[in-house]
C-alpha cells in the first residue's frame, strides 16, 4: 500500500534522534489517531544546520518525519516554513488517502519548531 | 524467505480436503438443490450431508442448522430474528462492549428501531462480571447476545453460566462462537444456548459461508426474505460448494480438535513466554483470563502497531494490530479500550493468532526477528525513556 520511497524512509529513516539544547523544538500530537512527533532544530544565521526527529506513529508517520528532516536540512528558516504536508507527501511519491493526515504531523512539528525558534530569538 | 502466517483469527487457509470436497460443486454438480430433476439431486444431498456434519460438530439436530452467507449474517439473523420475534414480550437486549462489529452494530441498529440495549463492561483482563449481567436483567429483557470467545484477545466468556442465568429468566441466549468453533469443544446438547453463530473462513473453510444454530422451539423472523430455502428461515439459493466446504471443515475440526489444541497451546505459550523474556515493557492483553489456545494479544509500550507490522512484513510474517493507525476509523480498537487500556497501549498492540499450518520453528523465527524490530521502533519513539525529555501526550 505504500510507495517504495515511503518504505525506504521507513526502513532507513534519516536524522533520527534529538538535538540537545536545540534552537527550536516542536512537539505535536496527531488529533486524528493519537500519534506523536518531536522535531528539534539547530539553527545558525537563520539557516537550519541540523534537524532530528522522534516519532511514535505508523509507517507513514515515520516516513513523513524522516522526509521532512531531509527537506529542511540546510534550508533557510523562511524557506523551510513554506513546506506543507502536501510537499512532504509529494516528495514521498504520495500517500494512501487514509494516511494523508499523518503528513500533517510532520509539517505541524516543523512549523512548531520554527515558531519556537522565532519566539526564543525575539 | 518463507511466508509465515500468524493471523488465523482474521481468516484461515482452506484445507486441501475441504477444497477437494467442494470442487465437484463448482464444476460438474452445478444444479440447483431445490430442483426436483436430476441436476438438483446430488447438490441437494450434498447440502443435507453438510448439514449433518455441522450438526454433529455442534451436537444438535440437522434441522437446527441454518446456512447463511457469513458469520456476520448469522449474527444479524440470530439477533434481529429473535428481537423481532419477541418484540411483543419486551424490548431489552443485553450484550457486551467487546463484541465483534457484526453484533455491536446490529444492536446499535436495533436501538434505532426502539429496542434498548445494555452493553456490559469488561475488567482489565477482558472479563465480564456475571453480577453486572444479573443486575442488567429486567422484565423487558428478551435477548442476551454474548460472544463465546473474543476475536482480538481470545478471552473466553463463561457461556455456560450465562446460559443458565438466561434460562432462569426465560431469556433467549445467542452466542457468537465464530472464534471458539474449532478451538474449543462445543456441545449444544449440554450447553444452554438457544442460538449460536459460526463462520466458515475461521474454520479452514472458504469465506462467504456461515451457519446459525437455532434450538428447536426458538423462533427467528427471517431477515432475508425469499424462497422456501432453509425451511423458510433464510431465502436464497444455497452456496452449495461453500456449504459442502463448511461441512467438511466441521468434520475435520472435530476429528483433530484434541491434537490441534495441544499443538496450538504449546506454540502460543512459547511465543508469549519468549516475547516476555526477550522484550521489556510488554503486556499480554487478557492475560489474566481463560483464553483461546491460539491467540496472543500483546501491547508493546512506547510504539505503534502498524510500524511493528510493517517491520514483521519485511520478514514475511503476518499478524494484526488494534492500533488506531490500522483501523481505518483512526480509533483504537474498542476491545482494548473497554479493558481500560490507554490509547497509547492499544496503539502498540499486536495480535498473533496461530493455526494448524504453523510450526514451532516459525515461532522461534518470530522470536528472533521481533525484538530488534521493537528496539528499532523504540529508539525512534519520543515516549521511550532515553529520550531526554519524554513528550507528555495530551488527547
Ligand atoms: C467474533 C466474530 N464474529 C463475527 C465475525 C464475522 O464473520 P464473517 O467474516 O464470516 O462475516 C468475525 C470475523 O471477523 C468474528 O471474529
Ligand atoms: S500516524 Fe496514525 S495513522 Fe499514521
Image (cartoon, grey):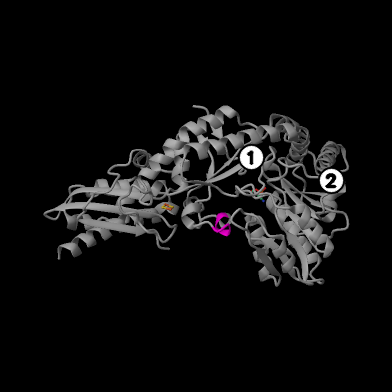
B30 sits to left or right of B387: right
Residue B40: where, in percent of width, then height? 84, 40
Q: Position of residue B272 (x, y in %)?
A: 56, 39
Marks 2,1: beta carbons within 8 A = no
Crowd class of label 2 (few under 14; some 14 to 19; many from 20; radius 10 Å)? some
Q: CA distance from mark 2 to mark 1?
A: 39 Å
Q: Is residue B290 above or below residue B95?
A: above
Q: Which residue corresponds to mark 1?
A: B294
Q: Nearer the viewer, residue B252 or A25?
A: A25
Coordinates of residue A10 in the picture (x, y in percent): 37, 42
In the rendered view, would you say A69 is above or below B253? below
The secondary structure that dominates the magenta segment is: helix
Residue A54 seen in the figure: yes
Percent x, y of residue B72: 68, 52
Asked if residue B235 shows in the view, the reply is no
Q: Residue at x 72, y 68 (%)?
A: B136
In screen coordinates, is B5 left or right of B53? Answer: left
Residue segment shown in magenta: B336-340
Give the residue pinned by disc 2: B34
Q: On residue A58, which mark appears? A: none
Residue closer to the observer: B325 or B345: B345
Same subunit, labels 2 and 1: the answer reads yes
Dot 1 crowding, Cα within 10 Å, few <14, some 14–19, many 20+ = many
Amino acid at each position: 500500500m505504500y510507495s517504495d520511497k515511503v518504505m525506504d524512509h521507513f526502513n532507513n529513516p534519516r536524522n533520527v534522534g534529538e538535538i540537545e539544547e536545540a534552537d527550536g523544538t516542536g512537539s505535536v500530537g496527531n488529533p486524528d489517531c493519537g500519534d506523536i512527533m518531536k522535531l528539534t532544530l539547530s539553527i545558525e544565521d537563520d539557516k537550519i544546520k541540523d534537524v532530528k526527529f522522534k516519532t511514535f506513529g505508523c509507517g507513514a508517520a515515520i516516513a513523513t518525519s524522516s522526509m521532512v528532516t531531509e527537506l529542511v536540512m540546510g534550508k533557510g528558516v523562511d524557506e523551510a516554513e513554506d513546506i506543507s504536508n502536501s510537499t512532504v507527501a509529494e516528495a514521498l511519491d504520495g500517500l494512501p488517502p487514509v494516511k494523508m493526515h499523518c503528513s500533517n504531523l510532520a509539517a505541524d512539528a516543523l512549523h512548531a519548531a520554527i515558531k519556537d525558534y522565532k519566539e526564543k530569538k525575539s | 524467505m518463507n511466508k509465515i502466517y500468524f493471523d488465523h483469527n482474521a481468516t484461515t487457509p482452506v484445507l486441501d480436503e475441504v477444497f477437494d470436497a467442494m470442487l465437484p460443486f463448482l464444476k460438474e454438480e452445478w444444479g440447483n438443490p431445490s430442483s426436483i430433476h436430476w441436476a438438483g439431486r446430488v447438490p441437494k444431498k450434498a447440502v443435507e450431508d453438510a448439514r449433518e456434519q455441522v450438526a454433529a460438530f455442534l451436537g444438535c439436530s440437522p434441522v437446527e442448522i441454518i446456512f447463511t452467507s457469513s458469520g456476520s449474517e448469522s449474527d444479524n439473523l440470530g439477533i434481529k430474528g429473535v428481537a423481532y420475534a419477541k418484540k411483543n414480550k419486551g424490548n431489552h437486549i443485553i450484550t457486551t462492549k467487546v463484541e465483534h462489529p457484526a453484533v455491536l452494530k446490529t444492536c446499535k441498529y436495533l436501538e434505532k428501531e426502539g429496542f434498548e440495549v445494555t452493553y456490559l463492561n469488561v475488567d482489565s483482563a477482558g472479563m465480564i462480571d456475571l453480577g453486572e449481567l444479573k443486575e442488567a436483567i429486567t422484565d423487558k429483557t428478551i435477548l442476551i447476545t454474548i460472544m463465546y470467545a473474543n476475536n482480538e484477545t481470545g478471552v473466553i466468556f463463561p457461556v455456560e453460566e450465562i446460559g443458565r442465568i438466561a434460562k432462569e429468566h426465560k431469556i433467549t441466549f445467542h452466542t457468537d462462537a465464530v472464534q471458539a468453533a474449532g478451538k474449543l469443544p462445543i456441545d449444544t446438547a449440554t450447553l444452554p444456548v438457544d442460538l449460536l453463530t459460526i463462520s466458515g473462513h475461521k474454520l479452514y473453510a472458504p469465506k462467504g459461508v456461515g451457519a446459525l444454530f437455532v434450538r428447536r422451539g426458538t423462533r427467528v423472523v427471517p431477515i432475508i426474505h425469499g424462497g422456501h430455502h432453509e425451511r423458510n428461515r433464510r431465502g436464497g439459493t444455497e452456496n452449495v460448494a461453500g456449504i459442502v466446504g463448511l461441512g467438511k471443515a466441521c468434520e475435520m475440526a472435530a476429528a483433530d480438535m484434541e491434537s490441534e489444541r495441544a499443538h496450538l497451546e504449546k506454540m502460543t505459550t512459547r511465543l508469549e513466554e519468549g516475547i516476555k523474556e526477550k522484550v521489556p515493557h510488554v503486556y499480554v492483553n487478557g492475560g489474566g483470563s481463560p483464553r483461546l489456545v491460539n491467540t496472543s494479544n500483546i501491547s508493546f509500550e512506547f510504539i505503534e502497531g502498524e510500524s511493528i507490522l510493517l517491520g514483521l512484513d519485511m520478514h514475511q510474517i503476518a499478524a494484526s494490530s488494534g492500533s488506531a493507525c490500522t483501523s481505518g476509523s483512526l480509533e483504537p480498537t474498542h476491545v482494548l479500550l473497554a479493558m481500560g487500556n490507554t490509547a497509547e497501549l492499544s496503539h502498540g498492540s499486536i495480535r498473533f493468532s496461530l493455526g494448524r499450518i504453523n510450526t514451532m520453528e516459525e515461532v522461534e523465527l518470530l522470536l528472533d526477528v521481533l525484538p530488534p524490530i521493537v528496539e528499532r521502533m523504540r529508539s525512534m519513539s519520543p515516549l521511550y525513556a532515553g529520550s531526554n525529555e519524554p513528550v507528555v501526550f495530551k488527547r
